[in-house]
C-alpha cells in the first residue's frame, strides 16, 4: 500500500472509537438524531480514509502502470473522486 499508513491508521482508529461510542449511545437509548449524527461522522472519516488510499493508488500504482504520460489523467480522476466522496 502506497498510502500514508500512519494517516490512514489514525483515521480508522478514530472511526472505530466513534463507532464504539455509537454502540454505547444505542445501549443508553440516546436520542435518535444524536445517534444518526454520530453515524454520519463515522462515515465521513471512513470516506476520508478511503480517499487517501485511492489517491495513493492512483498516483502510485496506476500512474506507474500507465507511464509518466498519465499524470494529467490521474489528476483528473482524483478531482472527480474528491467531488464524489464529499
Image: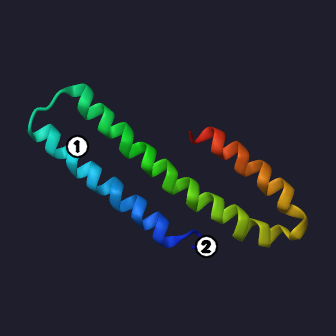
At horizontal 65% and vertical 39% (from top left) the residue drawn is: 83
Q: Residues within 10 Å of mark 2 (few under 14, many from 20)?
A: some
Give whichever of 40, 66 is nearer the camera: 40
Q: Residues within 10 Å of mark 1 (few under 14, many from 20)?
A: many
Give whichever of 18, 66 is nearer the camera: 18
Callout 2 secondary element: loop
Left or right: where 83 falls relative to 26: right
Left or right: where 81 falls relative to 40: right
Callout 1 secondary element: helix
Residue 5, image x and y in percent? 50, 72
Distance between the alpha carbons at the discs numbered 1 and 2: 31 Å
Earlier residue among tags 1 and 2: 2
Residue 10, image x and y in percent? 40, 64
Left or right: where 14 falls relative to 8: left
Residue 81, image x and y in percent? 66, 46
Quarter that holds the C terminus:
top right
Residue 2: mark in rendering: 2
* 32 over 73 or under it: above or below: above
Left or right: where 65 falls relative to 25: right
At horizontal 37% and vertical 45% (from top left) the residue drawn is: 42
Q: Pointers 1 and 2 in contact (CB under 8 A)?
A: no
Residue located beneath label 1 in the image: 22
At horizontal 10% and vertical 40% (from top left) the residue drawn is: 27
Residue 25, image x and y in percent? 16, 40
At horizontal 10% and vertical 32% (from top left) the residue drawn is: 29
Q: How is the image coloured?
A: rainbow
Amino acid at each position: 500500500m502506497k498510502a500514508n499508513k500512519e494517516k490512514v491508521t489514525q483515521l480508522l482508529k478514530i472511526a472505530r472509537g466513534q463507532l464504539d461510542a455509537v454502540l454505547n449511545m444505542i445501549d443508553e437509548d440516546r436520542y435518535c438524531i444524536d445517534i444518526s449524527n454520530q453515524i454520519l461522522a463515522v462515515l465521513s472519516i471512513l470516506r476520508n480514509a478511503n480517499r487517501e488510499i485511492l489517491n495513493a493508488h492512483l498516483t502510485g500504482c496506476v500512474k506507474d502502470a500507465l507511464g509518466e504520460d498519465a499524470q494529467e489523467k490521474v489528476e483528473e480522476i482524483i478531482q472527480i473522486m474528491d467531488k464524489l466522496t464529499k
